[in-house]
Image (cartoon, grey):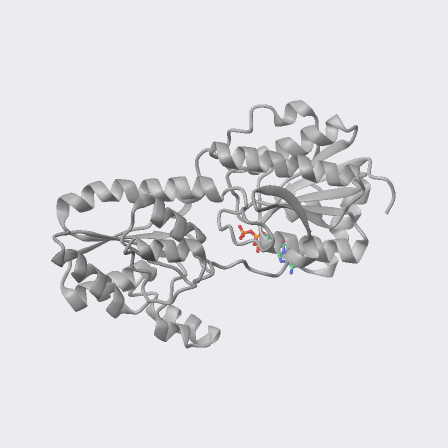
């Protein structure tokens, strides 16, 4: 590895609010320190196809407040093959790029780790995902903005739920982890929160609804993660669960509809389902995510200046820290059912489905 004079930045995987703030911070701090910067479009795809453009300070003006990513993002199958990565490396060299800053989630950082090992390329990762499931950081940017949107959805449902005496189910993003559902559920005052890390029992859900009815509360709001599973489903192998989901697909578009159907069947309540979907990724990043992405982005440039490669700037105990990408890639940070936040939620009388 020689001296780094020019860096390439890309955003990969799912977009997250704060990615633009990170692009801006890396670009500005790198230029401030005398480096040349190139923007790579559509994640690894742009590296493979050579969709790359020089970035000056003005290219990142007026973007800190924008959601999405000005560099676009993509999922790139070609980059998962040695041939694709060879093309990516050739384009890097052609463009004079000496080091990469990769902004994304677990998959993107796994790609970075493999690429760095194969071609001895200096890489820095940045944690940008609304799922907050990246191992090694207490917080990823995008997460807090997504909580704002998801909890706002629950707020809106509250008004209509209280008027109609129904059960409302709000299905939130999170196939493997329940971070967003847990935090948005708490912030929005949901009555039942169902996350993949705590498999649910229908009986517990029905009991929680009945208890509320007995207390004179005539509506119930359930926040459910799209990857929530029942205790019976938790016993199935991955393959069997996939088969079950496929067989149910015609009847239930997603988990919220299945739970809703069961509630009506078991206790006769009228149920309405709301799925905000990609709205949760959209809109402007909130101030927290802008500051977080900025601080992590500047740290990325600092690491490059110091010749420290193969790291991901992260948050540990409210401080900006660093962790080797090799320790992060391929792992998922799940909600610990015994963590403080879960135990605190239980003390509110919230039902977590178990
Ligand atoms: P999100 O958490 O929002 O889904 P992500 O970064 O985990 O973001 P992925 O779709 O898993 O998103 O990965 C993004 C891209 O990273 C993939 O399309 C692929 O180009 C690259 N990538 C993922 N895994 C690997 C791998 N094992 N080898 C090489 N490249 C990979």
What residue is shown at x 68% (from left), y 28% (from top)?
28
Image x and y of residue 195, in percent: 39, 60
208 to 293, vertically: above or below: below
What residue is shown at x 64% (from left), y 56% (from top)?
328
Report if residue 190 is visible in the image.
yes
> Furthest residue to the right?
2
Numbered circles on residues, count: 0
Report if residue 70 is visible in the image.
no
Left or right: residue 34 compared with residue 230: right
Split into quadrants, the picture shows ligand 1 in the one at: bottom right
Image x and y of residue 244, in percent: 38, 73
Left or right: residue 274 compared with residue 209: right
Nearer-the-camera pick, 94 or 1:
1
Nearer-the-camera pick, 244 or 286:
286
Image x and y of residue 57, in percent: 68, 24
Nearer-the-camera pick, 128 or 182:
182
What residue is shown at x 70% (from left), y 57% (from top)?
326
Task: Identify the image quadrant of residue 204.
Answer: bottom left
């Amino acid at each position: 590895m020689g001296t780094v004079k020019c860096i390439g930045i890309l955003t990969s995987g799912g977009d997250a609010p704060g990615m633009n703030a990170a692009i801006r911070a890396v670009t500005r701090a790198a230029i401030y320190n005398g480096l040349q910067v190139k923007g790579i479009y559509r994640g690894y795809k742009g590296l493979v196809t050579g969709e790359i453009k020089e970035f000056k300070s003005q290219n990142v003006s007026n973007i800190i407040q924008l959601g999405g990513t000005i560099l676009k993002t993509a999922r790139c199958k070609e980059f998962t093959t040695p041939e694709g990565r060879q093309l990516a490396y050739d384009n890097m060299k052609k463009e004079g790029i000496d080091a990469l800053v990769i902004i994304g989630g677990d998959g993107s950082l796994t790609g970075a780790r493999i690429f760095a090992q194969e071609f001895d390329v200096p890489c820095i990762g940045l944690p940008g995902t609304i799922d907050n499931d990246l191992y090694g950081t207490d917080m990823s940017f995008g997460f807090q903005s997504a909580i704002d949107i998801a909890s706002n959805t629950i707020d809106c449902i509250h008004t209509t739920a209280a008027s109609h005496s129904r059960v409302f189910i709000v299905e939130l993003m999170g196939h493997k982890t329940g971070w967003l559902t847990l935090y948005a559920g708490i912030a929005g005052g949901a009555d039942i929160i169902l996350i993949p890390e705590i498999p649910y029992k229908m009986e517990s859900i029905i009991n929680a609804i009945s208890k509320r009815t007995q207390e004179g509360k005539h509506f119930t709001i359930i926040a459910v993660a799209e990857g929530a599973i029942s205790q019976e489903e938790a016993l199935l192998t991955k393959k069997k669960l996939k088969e079950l989901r496929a067989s149910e697909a015609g009847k239930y578009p997603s988990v919220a509809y299945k739970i809703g159907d069961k509630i009506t069947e078991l206790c006769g309540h009228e149920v309405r389902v709301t799925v905000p979907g990609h709205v949760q990724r959209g809109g402007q990043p909130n101030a927290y995510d802008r500051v977080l992405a900025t601080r992590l982005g500047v740290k990325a440039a600092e690491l490059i200046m110091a010749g420290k490669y193969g790291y991901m700037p992260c948050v540990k105990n409210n401080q900006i820290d660093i962790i080797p990408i090799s320790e992060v890639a391929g792992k998922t940070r799940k909600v610990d059912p015994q963590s403080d936040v879960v135990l605190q939620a239980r003390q509110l009388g919230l039902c977590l489905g178990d």
